[in-house]
Amino acid sequence: MKKIWHWLLEKIKKDMQTDPFTITPRRTKLSYYFDSFTSIIFYLMGLYLMLIDLYHELFTSDKTDFVGTALMAFILIFGGLLFRWSAYADIRAINRYRQYLKQQIIDQRQALRRQEWLKSAEQGKTELEQKLNHKE
């Protein structure tokens, strides 16, 4: 009965060990690359918009709404920062999940070693009892 309770307790502990910060279906290398690529596109669009607006403002006779265009460029660059942050969060979650899996493997190996040690201890105990009973 004691072994059954111990086994159930170990199973409950193992089932409760999850990484709450990782959402595995979304956090993939593909999402990291997509977010990085999208952030670069947003950066380039924002910088291009700002440079074209500066060119028109300073070197041509076209007078554009500089503040409105600068605001649009800022929004594009801010969007690029958000996508970059998302890519960084993806790679951190992937690394955290790998660490979690490594820890699971280490825990399983320790449990296996503990079981083997207990088995060898039981075997040594039975051998000792047999030797003592044989001498009597």
Image: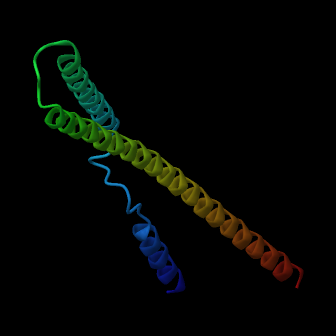
109 lies left or right of 56:
right
Closer to the camera, 91 or 48? Answer: 48
27 lies left or right of 108:
left
Closer to the camera, 16 or 78? Answer: 78
Q: Is residue 111 above or below residue 43?
A: below
Give the colour scheme shown. Answer: rainbow
Q: Kindly identify the residue that appears in the image at 53 percent across and 85 percent down.
A: 2
Q: Residue furthest front?
A: 61
Closer to the camera, 83 or 118? Answer: 83
Q: Quadrant of residue 44?
A: top left
Q: Residue furthest top?
A: 60
Q: Position of residue 19 (x, y in %)?
A: 41, 60
Q: Position of residue 26 (x, y in %)?
A: 27, 47
Q: Is residue 9 above or below residue 17?
A: below
Q: Kindly identify the residue that appears in the image at 82 percent across and 82 percent down.
A: 133
Q: Kindly identify the residue that appears in the image at 38 percent across and 59 percent down.
A: 21
40 lies left or right of 117:
left
Q: Is residue 46 above or below residue 15?
A: above
Q: Quadrant of the C terminus?
A: bottom right
Q: How many marks?
A: 0
Q: Position of residue 14 (x, y in %)?
A: 45, 67
Q: Is residue 41 above or below residue 79?
A: above
Q: Position of residue 63 (x, y in %)?
A: 11, 23
